[in-house]
Image (cartoon, helix red, strand yellow):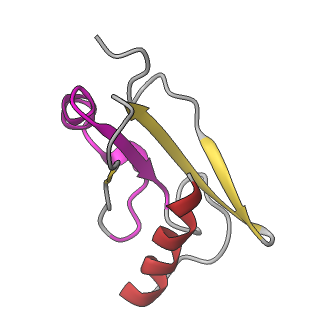
Amino acid sequence: MLKHTHETTPTQYIQAGDIHVAYRRFGKHGGTPLLLLNHFAANMDDWDPKVTNGLAEDRDVIIFDYTGVGNSSGETPSNIVALAKDVELLQSA
């Protein structure tokens, strides 16, 4: 049984200048984490917890909100390159 799940893990933030990106990290720690990329303008709670919790049984999982979406501040990215910059921020998570 997972200590923390999609629903119970506290939301954390990575700060980059005046922008903060919201994320949750949960599951079995160790190894390379699985970073779940959502569809454009979807927030991390749009993931089905049955899927994310199932993945977290065997690995470390990170879900997040792109800038300007959900609990993240800033301007919503308008292209893939801008979305990728959000992913770069999560390297320190």
Instruction: Please give the name of the residue rendered at 52% of the width and 62% of the height, measured from the top-left corner.
Output: 91
Q: Position of residue 21 (x, y in %)?
A: 61, 59
Residue 73: name its quadrant.
Answer: bottom right
- Does 52 sit above or below residue 80? above
Instruction: Indicate the position of residue 62 as horizontal and vertical percent values.
Output: 40, 47
Q: Specify the farthest residue to the front.
A: 31
In this view, the residue in front, 67 or 63, is: 63
Q: Is residue 22 above or below residue 52?
A: below
The x and y percentages for residue 55 are 21, 36
| Magenta residue span | 40-65
Closer to the camera, 33 or 51?
33
Q: Is residue 30 above or below residue 80?
A: above
Report the side of 66 relative to 16 (left or right). Answer: left
Q: Give the residue drawn at x 58%, y 52%.
A: 22
Q: Quadrant of the N terminus?
A: top left
Q: Nearer the viewer, residue 61 or 49?
A: 61
Q: Is residue 13 left or right of residue 56?
A: right
Looking at the image, which residue is at 27% across and 32% down? 56
